Amino acid sequence: MNEDKKIAGFSKLSKTEKIHWLAQNFLYNNPIQVAKEFATFWHDNIEEQKLFDGFSENTITNFYLPFGIAPNFKINNKMYAIPMVTEESSVVAAASNAAKFWLDRGGFTSTVLNTIKIGQVHFNYKGSTEKLKSYFPELKEALILGSKDITANMEKRGGGIVDIELLDMTSKLENYFQLRCSFQTCDSMGANFINSVLERFGQLLIELISSNDLFTYQEKEVKVIMCILSNYTPDCVVRSMVSCPVKDLGVVDGMPAEEFAEKFVQAVKIAIIDPYRATTHNKGIMNGIDSVIIATGNDFRAVESCAHTYASRSGSYSSLTDASIENGIFKFWIEIPLALGTVGGLTALHPLAKKSMELLGTPNASELMMITATVGLAQNFGAVKALTTSGIQQGHMKMHLSNIMMSLQATEEELSKAKEYFKDKVISFNAAREFLVSIRNRAYSH
Ligand code: MEV
């Protein structure tokens, strides 16, 4: 194996040294030139750049993503202009269109159903299960008492440990037990708080059992495997909804209201029963949700993994949204777990996450849950509306055409000519290039 590119102490090199090493070993280019290219994306302000560098490790530059705004969101009678960070074209446009569509029909309503977070202490115990179960009430009290120094502040804010359960998992894995703990973490996402409490529980569990004469010598050998929060939070759920009389949907992209409503509900029902469609359907929802989560500095990986587990809770992967028509009323809603924080973490550190929070009126965690779920619902409405009427390609291809023309250095005038020309034609890179060449030739020959 060729290991000449192996390096020790990469993290200790300065940013420029790291880039030089990359230029020599992987980019095969002049280090000065490569450094210049990466430096184009550095922040002018050295202090700000230090802040960005500190978010992660081995940083050599910044990776830009568009920060867009979806205006006209009315949620629980309050207006929002919602920041969205995404690299995918049409996402912000679709969310904005859906927001405007529902603004004219009363807006969205949203409710937080609960806000419980979960953590686990996984451990091995080889003794009598009955004995452990009988000792558990005393153990639970001792665990809560023994972690007071960590929980006191959170309790002052109205949160803390909600419950601890002992789960006998030995039928699935030999000697395996679990403490499943639930927490209230107020406006923080709470990962650090939960993990600190869990690690204390792990220590106490070993100490308390090994020093208790109820247990035999062998039973005292409790082994803690790991202590960590669970990103699955099925009791930290928010529901957002829209509804209106079917007739008030109006003619949707040329389709009469009744036909649209029926097709739309069918499309959602298909996503409920078919995992292949559900995956794409939910991907569309997450287009909106992730964009808000990134813009506000929350953890989109945690939200993603949780959403998909929740979507599988029936045993089969299903849609996160549902829709109905009853007594002439069209209803469309989402129910999704969102463990978000508005204090601590990146929210308060990243200058643009801070700005996003300001734009949203400095929401608390529950409000942010409602805003984010609503964007997911709007995004799904936009996608399913397009899919069941004009098809998704029309909008996509318009954006695609703009991107192609931009890559060919087309002027504004050339772009608008291209938009007109391709209104009723299939767009491809070659077709766009040929069109551009033809109008330039024509202009040249005049
Ligand atoms: C594309 O990013 C998302 C959609 O495919 C979602 C959907 O099909 O519902 C348009």
Image (cartoon, rainbow, N blue to C red):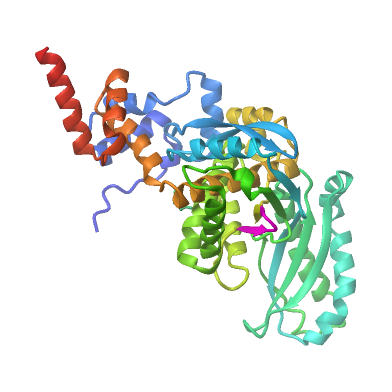
The image position of residue 46, as x and y in percent, is 51, 20
Q: Between residues 39 and 428, which one lies in front from this camera angle?
A: 428
The segment highlighted magenta reads 322-329
The image position of residue 438, as x and y in percent, is 15, 25
The image position of residue 96, as x and y in percent, is 55, 35
Tell me where residue 9 sits by quadrant: top left
For residue 160: magenta? Answer: no
Task: Identify the residue shown where x is 38% and y is 25%.
Answer: 39
> Looking at the figure, which quarter contains the C terminus?
top left
Task: Identify the residue shown where x is 53% and y is 51%.
Answer: 260
Magenta stretch: helix, strand or loop mostly: strand
Please indicate whether residue 338 sits to the left or right of residue 129 in the image. Answer: left
Q: Residue furthest left?
A: 445
For residue 326: magenta? Answer: yes
Q: Between residues 56 and 304, which one lies in front from this camera angle?
A: 304
Task: Identify the residue shown where x is 16% and y is 15%.
Answer: 443
Can see residue 299? no
Can see residue 59? yes
- Image height of 98 relative to 321, above or below: above
Tell me where residue 196 sits by quadrant: bottom right
Give the total number of marks visible in the rendering.
Answer: 0
Please indicate whether residue 386 sits to the left or right of residue 117 in the image. Answer: left
Task: Identify the residue shown where x is 82% and y is 86%.
Answer: 130
Q: Between residues 292 and 103, which one lies in front from this camera angle?
A: 103
The image position of residue 127, as x and y in percent, is 75, 86
> Looking at the figure, which quarter contains the N terminus?
bottom left
